[in-house]
Image: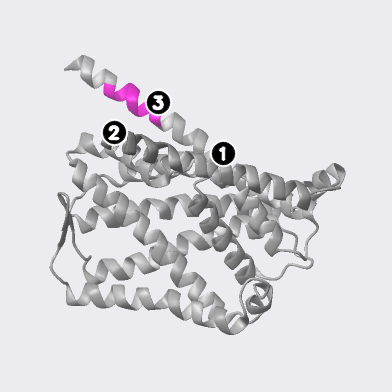
Amino acid sequence: MARASAGWRRFIWPVIGFAAIAVSFWLLARELRGMSWVELWQSFHAIPLRNWILVVGCTLGCYTVLGLYDVLALRHLRRKLNFGFVLATSLTTYAIAHNIGASALSGAVIRYRAYSTKGLSGAEVGMVVTFCSLTFALGVMLLLGIDFLLTPTLEQRFAQFLPPAVLHWVALGLLLPIVLYLLGSILSPPPLRIRGFVLTYPRPAIALLQLAVAPIEILFAAGILYFALPGDGNPGYWVVMAVFVTAFSLALLSHAPGGLGVFELAVLTALPEFQPEVVLAALLVFRFFYLLIPLAAGLVMIALFEHSRLRSDDAA
């Protein structure tokens, strides 16, 4: 019975992910009905060189800052590793996880393979994965909470889903856990033990760095989409950022591989001021720079890492 239950849990999330893709593609087909391929191609050509350069810069900045997630996690564990190794591990982890989905699972596998060679235990790698996921969640809550409070136009944009007054309370609800998290880091309650894992609150300095690093990474990632959109009719960076974070979060929650379809549908729906061809072109640019190029780089790094491990094993 236990084995059957474990098998059911193993397959449920992939089924949910592919179901989300199917539904999203059906809805996308309705959104893009009558789309002009000529206008889509023209939308690529309309992106100025300056914006292409900024897209590249945002991509580099994003994946560099992502490496700091792992650096902070290791510092929390009082482990010090070579920054280049940590950065390469982080880039590979997120490049693979963002493309295949199930980021916690895939991230754990890649991190364990890399960090175990540096002496980290399975429990410590699990802590790194948990810490990095928490850092991202804190960044999302902080940015969305502040953005919803300080950008009035967002209230009307999301009015079809939530009344403006409710959205205001949602923003406050997003910021409350951050206040409690910081308070917990100051009070330093006893560690929480769960099946061999020991979860401890980070020190206040590390908690504050989490709240600085995660928003910077998310701002860079949103910048890729923003600079791929035209300037005419653009609602502004903070609106695009809120749309991006919401769509990206929905894509992660859907468990769809790479958020395929879910992310595109959410962005298209939330940016009605643009023609679908324009938004789709920006989304393809985002996927190419944020997902496909890092994926290629990550696969190369995995090959080089495994090659170096084989050579060291042969030498031994």
Q: Amino acid at mark 3?
A: Ala
Q: Amino acid at mark 2?
A: Arg
Task: Pick whichever, 216 or 34, lies toward us.
Answer: 34
Q: Give the side of residue 146 with respect to residue 27, left or right.
A: left
Q: Is residue 164 above or below residue 217?
A: below
Q: Which residue is mark 3?
A: 303
Q: Which residue is mark 1?
A: 292
Q: Residue at x 27, y 18 (%)?
A: 311
Q: Residue at x 68, y 72 (%)?
A: 160
Task: Identify the image quadrant of the C terminus.
Answer: top left
Q: Name, please, the residue furthest toward the front.
A: 1
Q: Secondary structure at mark 2?
A: helix
Q: Residue 3's mark? A: 2
User: Which segment is the magenta one?
Assistant: 302-309
The colouring scheme, among rainbow, by chain, secondary structure or one colour, is one colour
Q: How far apart are labels 2 and 3 at the CA level?
A: 34 Å
Earlier along the polypeptide chain: callout 3 or callout 1?
Answer: 1
Q: Is residue 101 visible?
A: yes
Task: Identify the image quadrant of the N terminus.
Answer: top left
Q: Are marks 3 and 1 in contact (CB under 8 Å)?
A: no
Q: Give the side of residue 43 with respect to residue 187, left or right.
A: right
Expressed as whole percent of the image width and height from the top left, the position of residue 101 reads 48, 43
Task: Please tell me how crowded label 3 is: few (under 14), some (14-19), or many (20+) other residues with Cα within 10 Å.
Answer: few
Earlier along the polypeptide chain: callout 1 or callout 2?
Answer: 2
Q: Which mark's residue is nearer the viewer, 1 or 2?
A: 2
